[in-house]
Image: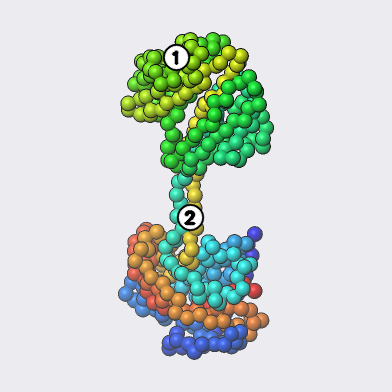
Amino acid sequence: MKRFIAFQLLVIVSLTSCKKDPLPESSVGEAAFVSMVNFNGEDFNITAGENGISLDPVLELYTDSVVFNSAFTNFSCPECGPQLRMIIHSPDSVVPSFVANWISELDAWPYEMEESGSEIMESTLGLTVSCGNNFSQGVWSLNGAVLNGGAASNTVSFEVEEGNYSLVFDNDDVFCVDGGPRSINFDGESIPCYGSLSIDPNQFNTYSANPGEGFNPATTTYTWFADTLEISTGQDPTLTAQFSPNVDSLCVLIDDPFGCSVTECIAILPFGSDCVTNLAITESVLNDTTIVNPSFGAFVEIQFRDAEGNLYTSNDTNQENSQIELLSIEAYTEPTLGAMPFANVTYQVSCTLYDDSGNAFPFSGMINTALALPE
């Protein structure tokens, strides 16, 4: 929820310079707010209390940010010029309720005319994994963290960020051979190469190699090994064979010379065993998420209305040559407004302003204004 706190300062004092003697903390008195700027080669002195100009500092207070919106404005003629507005967005790292002293806080901020926060695309990998048979129910864990709340199942779906993972299936079926954990390595950009090797549940001597993403069936070959002995090669993804008791495992090299290459293995069922767990990725999807990197600087917008009433703004992405510097800041209270807290600030600014058509105009000078502060 946000709160808007608006104030109007009508100051009928004129100065020839915006230089001020420092005011003591919590001082009360009138101040002359004068901004001297140059727009497209023409000088402008904008003074609160002269030519119908009022200083209107507005505070927009949120739970996780604050916006100072301070304007030299003509309430009786909003489209007359010259008028000037400065909008300061707090850094993303600022939580208003944690700020003890706003004068010190504003003085410490780095100011920028171009937002430094950026949006990037970050990918996550969604996977569905099977235990490799239709008999076993077990608990899944990823890098030691239990999945699905510890509920037993023969498949599991989850999502990972960039990194290396070990997926474990804890099966208490003593008659099922444990195929061990499954390694998952995700580079954060693309679906990793993977495949699987399964046994036909109706014919225990028939095996199938299942290539995952990244394989072209037209160019993929399968090379089979009984332990380390090569027994077959070709483009047939199935193998029917019986093995002697001293053979412990069957492996297949799934190879696409124009894509992925992986080796998958499965334990040979010994006498008395009715299944084997061989964790197999059955589905994969790449999910793109927009991540916003926070800005640690205070983003400043300048709006200027020239003598003809035309409006220009700095709120454009091309501010790479802009500069802004806080020259002075001091606490200020205005007795006509019930001694509400303000900051009397002066900024040196050099930037580019743009009209509605995108035409660029140079802008520079000193902006002396008041910022309404949270109480």
Judge whether residue 133 can be spotted in this image: no
- Which amino acid is tagged 1? Thr
- Which residue does the image show at 55% across and 34% down from the upper left? 167
In the rendered picture of this protein, how many numbered marks are placed on residues? 2
- Which residue does the image show at 42% across and 66% down from the upper left? 113
**For the view shown, which residue lies furthest in the front direction?**
246
Q: Earlier in the sequence, mark 2 or mark 1?
A: 1
Judge whether residue 251 can be spotted in this image: yes
In percent of width and height, residue 178 lies at 57, 25
- Which residue does the image show at 49% across and 47% down from the upper left? 290
In percent of width and height, residue 110 lies at 46, 69
Q: Quadrant of the N terminus?
A: bottom right
- Badge 2: residue crowd in 10 Å (few <14, some 14–19, many ≥20): few
In percent of width and height, residue 239 lies at 44, 13
Badge 1 marks a residue whose secondary structure is strand
Q: Is residue 212 above or below residue 90?
A: above
Q: Is residue 138 above or below residue 100?
A: above
Contact, mark 2 vs mark 1 (Cβ under 8 Å): no
Give the colour scheme shown: rainbow
Q: Quadrant of the C terminus?
A: bottom right
Give the left or right position of residue 375, taking residue 260 as reference.
Answer: right
Residue under numbered circle 1:
238
Residue under numbered circle 2:
293
Depth check: give the residue in front, 67 or 106.
Answer: 106
In percent of width and height, residue 247 lies at 48, 17
Depth check: give the residue in front, 364 or 285.
Answer: 285
- Which residue does the image show at 35% across and 63% down from the upper left? 320
- Which amino acid is tagged 2? Asn
Q: CA distance from mark 2 to mark 1?
A: 49 Å
Badge 2 marks a residue whose secondary structure is strand
- Badge 1: residue crowd in 10 Å (few <14, some 14–19, many ≥20): some
